[in-house]
Image (cartoon, grey):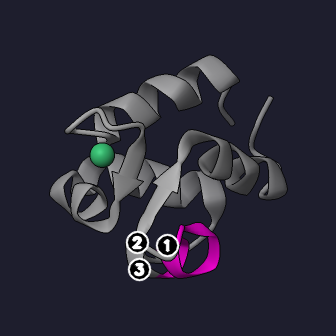
Amino acid sequence: MATEQELQSLFNKLDIDQDGKVSIHELFFSPGLSAIILADTGISSPLEFLNKYGDKDGSITFEEFKKVVEEAGNLN
Ligand SMILES: [Ca+2]
């Protein structure tokens, strides 16, 4: 379970170049952090995560990310 604030701070850590989107490269760059995300969303791999919820350019915004965690029932 996570609060929106915790999600935002997690997202910011994943968004290494701070462009407001987490790309698949950034997900793979932080395996420890992506493991937390994957645990929160119940999705087994970063690739699956992006295929299901990401933009066509292979990245995910915070709003999309939040939706995923809400759907998984892990947002307080
Ligand atoms: Ca980024």
Residues shaded magenta: 48-55
Residue type indicated by callout 1: Leu
Residue 14 rendering spot, x and y as whole percentages: 32, 42
Q: Secondary structure at mark 2?
A: loop
**The label number, if any, that marks residue 59 in the structure image:** none
Who comes first in sequence, dot 2 or dot 1? Answer: 1
Mark 1 and mark 2 in contact (Cβ < 8 Å)? yes
Q: Is residue 39 magenta?
A: no
Mark 1 within 8 Å of ligand 1, using the beta carbon: no
Q: Which residue is mark 1?
A: 50
Observer-nearest of 9 and 61: 61
Q: Which residue is mark 3?
A: 47
**The label number, if any, that marks residue 58 in the structure image:** 2
| Quadrant of res 62 | top right
Residue 76 rendering spot, x and y as whole percentages: 80, 28
| Quadrant of res 57 | bottom left
**Quadrant housing the N terminus:** top right
Who comes first in sequence, dot 3 or dot 2? Answer: 3
Residue type indicated by callout 3: Leu
Mark 3 and mark 1 in contact (Cβ < 8 Å)? yes
Residue at screen point 27% across, 50% down: 32
